[in-house]
Amino acid sequence: MISDEKGLRAAMLATRLAFLAAGFVMACWAPLIPFAKQQVGADEGVFGLLLLCLGLGAIVAMPLTGYLSARTGARAMILLGGFGLVAFLPLVVIAPTVWTLGLALAVFGAALGTIDVAMNIHAAEVETRAARPMMSGFHAMWSVGGILGAGGLTALLSAGLSPLGAALVGSALAGCAMILAAPRLLRQSGGAKPEFVRPRGIVLLLAILAAISFLVEGAVLDWGALLIVDQGLMAATGAGIGYMLFSIAMTIARLTGDWLVAALGRGRIMILGGLVAIAGIALTLVPGMLWPALLGFALIGLGCANLVPVLFSLAAQSRDMPPGLAVAAVTTTGYAGILLGPALIGFAADATSLAMAFGALALLMAAFPLAAQRASRIG
């Protein structure tokens, strides 16, 4: 435990700021997606490939970040990833061609993967030194950032600010958060070396479920605004409200998640979360009606909010793998879902329609109520 209480409070603040900035910039991307797609004239299939560039950049950066963080501490990698997001958010808006947008998204994704891994390593170190649970609160700040990012950018675009101008405002705000965090971050880490470990036993099931949950979250982020526009429910300038409602609902559910898990148990949370998310997905597909779709995005957020925290808790209790390795495997597989999954949505939308691709997510979410008893038995 950190002897200096002031230093502990500073490290806690820095960790919250890192999560806030990362969630904020990632959510800023959501309302800008229709403009980036229009800028390069890409159809759903091509845009799916562009989103794959974002995912591949993150996946490549994750193991390297874990190795470097283990050697030198997470601080440098948090700053590299955070300021990388700040720098490349405006660039993904003004990229003039498919190739330049693909390159910009690959670097943007690498920055996201870097800060994602590094800030979780830092959060675990702060939690260990503080000798009390803190991880849920840190992750809640990502959701708060999502609300502020999606809501703020949507408001700026609706007020008539250009996509580039809105992106620059978002980058400036996130940059301020990173500047405040920098001197307060821990300068060394005493944790074990993080690495990707192939899941086995019950951890494999948990990893698959994590990938599904993250895939749905990534689909709402990358395709939610386009779904609203494609359904003819709202113009592109206001379509980011879907992700904003998703983020608000997820934040509320996460803030009350510990109480709900204690009251209902992990198995019931998985069943109810899966069913609520399925209902939300169905509502987003009601043709020609805006309010059911907006309610649907909120229900998806409520349903998905506590699924991943429950999966992490179960992984830590698994006897099939050491706790740290189990959580690392589930985390990396889950982030692969959120980063690579939306590209698959693009391929499916190009082959059928975006509405049908979203409908397929409901079938995937059915895995939670079906697997809840088996997955939660270890807890």
Image (spheres, helix red, strand yellow):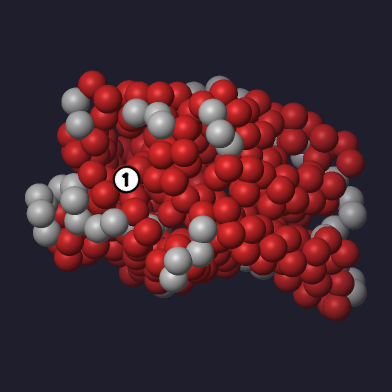
Asked whether the viewer can see residue 338, the reply is no
Q: Residue at x 51, y 50 (%)?
A: 29
Q: In this rendering, would 226 be left or right of 251?
A: left
Q: Position of residue 125 (x, y in %)?
A: 76, 55
Task: Using the image, determine if residue 234 lies above or below residue 260.
Answer: above
In depth, the one of 18 and 83 nearer the eye is 83
Asked whether the viewer can see residue 29, the reply is yes
Question: Residue under circle 1?
Answer: 226
Q: Secondary structure at mark 1?
A: helix
Q: Residue at x 19, y 51 (%)?
A: 232
Find the residue positioned furthest to the bottom.
Answer: 6
**Which residue type does callout 1 highlight?**
Leu
The quadrant where residue 92 appears:
top right
In depth, the one of 347 and 272 nearer the eye is 347
The quadrant where residue 145 appears:
bottom right
Q: Position of residue 58 (x, y in %)?
A: 61, 33
Residues packed near mark 1 inside 10 Å, few (<14), some (14 to 19) or many (20 plus): many
Q: Residue at x 37, y 59 (%)?
A: 237
Task: Using the image, determine if residue 327 lies above or below residue 200.
Answer: below
